[in-house]
Image (cartoon, helix red, strand yellow):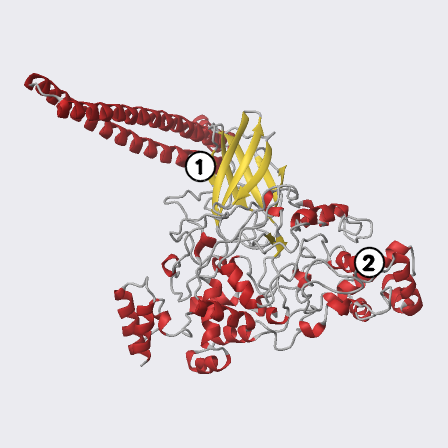
Amino acid sequence: MTWRVVVALSFTALTLLSPSRLVAQAHNVMSQGHHKLLEADSTAKQAREAIKQSNKVRKALGRYRYELSQSDTAEAQSTLRQAISDHTLQLHHWEAQGLKLRQDSAVQKTESLKLLRAGMIANWSSWISQPGPLRGAELTSPLDNRSHNSPQRSVHRNMPTPRSDTELQSAEGMSLQVSALAGQQLPEGLDTGSFSVSRQRKIFAHIELIQDRSQFVPINQLHRWRLILSSLDGEAITDGQVRFGGHMPGHVHGLPTQPIIEAGSAPGVYEISGVKFQMGGWWVIELELETSVGSDSVRFNVVL
Amino acid sequence: MLGLMSFFNALRRRPQPLLRSLACLLLASFAGPVTAQGAHADPYAFTVADQAFLSQFTLKQLPPLPSAPGNLQADNPAAAELGRVLFFDKKLSANGEISCAHCHQPERAFTDGLSVPQALGKGRRNTPSLLGAAYSPWQYRDGRKDSLWAQALAPLLDENEHGMTRQNVVAVIEENYRQDYEAIFGPLSSVSQVFANVGKAIMAYERLLIPGASKFDDFVDALAEPASKRAVLSANFSSQEVKGLRLFVGKARCASCHNGPLFTNSEFHNVGTPEADVQSVDLGRYSGIEGLREDEFSCLSAWSDAAPEQCLELKFLKRQGPELVGAFRTPSLRNVALTAPYMHAGQFKTLEEVVAHYNKPTPPFYDRQQHPSRPHFDITPLGLDEKERSALVAFLKSLSSKELTH
């Protein structure tokens, strides 16, 4: 092996490992995710079309069945029976199609989020230390994401029926039946992840706790979060104006403070200070974003 | 016998499936390890996880006092001593008969036993306890003051309370406490500065008013001890109190807001307490925000020792939202048995009435002419039966300190 080859090889290795190349790869991964997400959206659209079709066919079927019940000539009955048989086949086809497309779309969406997440983690590796969901200290929420089944209304006259003991649960190893999630009902499969795609598909965002004292989100204490904003292709969003809002579903109140968001130490990185939660439970955090790629909003579910 | 009783108890609890009841029976009769299922057999049977959960409410978990950047003398013992003397000094009133202790009576956990205070005139809101008040970022039931020192100044000037002027207060200091004052704060200066420092001395005293341990604290501490020593548990904490404790953290949902060692989140909620005066409604936190904005002695003021960036609660102050209307600060439940009447205007005379309200709450009074928006309402009926309600009251009474201050 001549020295030229050695130099060339080391040069290639260096280029492969250089930060700019890694960043480019991360962008690439996010772009793939973006692409996948568009695919998922388009599949979801097809699924909706298929379901629309199946509804149309179902309606027609109903009409033919009614006509059959009213018809008195053998000829008409035979035609109608044929139509019913055809439409039944069609109905099965569209229903199956709709279901399959919907499942495909869900799979594509999961894959796309995986890619976006991986790309963002690679791109902002120095700033993302907690890719998992935000967590409250275990003691304040022993039931984690389990909830009871009471239909919850918190406002006035038509009050819910009194709760019964069945709505309370015991966490592992506890004899105390602690009122779960401050009386909230958690939807099945609620996404509590710390990465989220914005409503208009313009922005990908991540939140995490800035660990001053503890790895857990505290109750009744002001604390700080880090926010990372990027386009779906991995470009940092540097000029974002962010409005921080939040509420507890089933409770009419919002956050007890008005947090302040400031641009952080790197492109796309922001610091949110003054966050405070006065109760454990399910919180929905909503960020209203004004950015160079347009206005948009992004949501996170936090269960403390 | 125990097993049989548990069986009947389990049967009485309607929603329990029969199988589970049988499991209770078996476990109880074998006196085997305590499990979640076996719990109803013996209200005293707490698991390790229960103990860990309950310990978050004990005084041992009380953190150090929060820092007080607005008052450099907050932890100066000499300031606390001057503050203590001022707190009990009747000279700090227009008629020479009213001190802070007139309404904040130590033997009643620093309350006055009245629905609304009666000093020179009649007040509007029930006198809150001062035990543990230093831990709250907000003072007054509407949180219109952001420190104990800013709060302590307001009653001095209120014509229904002490009825003083700033000059009167400074004159009292000059005549009676000049030496003590100057040793702490330096030479007497402008009227407003001396006046502000009077508040800071009183605050230094109030920071020492930490509730003492209660039967409840002893009980939870004892749970951590080996099972053999637990036999004495029942002697000091009745089964009624234990049942109430279980309800408090569970079905009655008290711990949603009354959490932590002081049993409060120090935040503001509208629990639909009947309006004391429908002709002139109390807007609670909504008006408290106005008060903070106008306060001459806030953390951001010239009289505060804090740099503006240290005033975090004001920096992140929530200034609007329907949940502010008619919302009042969650009070600590420590010594609650001593602080009747209850709620922001003393609407309820007894704890039984309070629990009855939470059990079947009425929506807040709403008057479009007076309220900026329909008040937010944050509680739902609990469905506690009579026995459960009295158990809950028994538990609340177990929160009284054996010795009032720590």
Badge 2 and badge 1 in a common chain: no
Against B79, residue A106 (above or below) is above
Q: Quadrant of residue B170?
A: bottom right
Residue designated by label 1: A117
Seen at 50% across and 35% down, the residue is A298
Against A230, residue B351 (above or below) is below
Residue designated by label 2: B159
| Residue B326: mark | none
Q: Dot 2: within a 10 Å radius of its alpha carbon, few (fewer than 14), some, or many (20 or more) residues? A: some
Against A268, residue B362 (above or below) is below
Name the element at disc 2: loop
Residue nearer the viewer, B60 or A116: B60
Chain letter for mark 2, please: B
Amino acid type of the residue that numbered disc 1 sits on in the rendered structure: Arg
Seen at 43% across and 56% down, the residue is A180
Q: Is residue B34 visible?
A: no
Seen at 63% across and 73% down, the residue is B212
Q: Is residue A232 visible?
A: yes
Amino acid type of the residue that numbered disc 2 sits on in the rendered structure: Glu
Residue nearer the viewer, A116 or A165: A165
Going by the image, does B152 lie left or right of B236?
right
Residue nearer the viewer, A40 or B131: B131
Name the element at disc 1: helix
Residue nearer the viewer, B171 or B284: B284
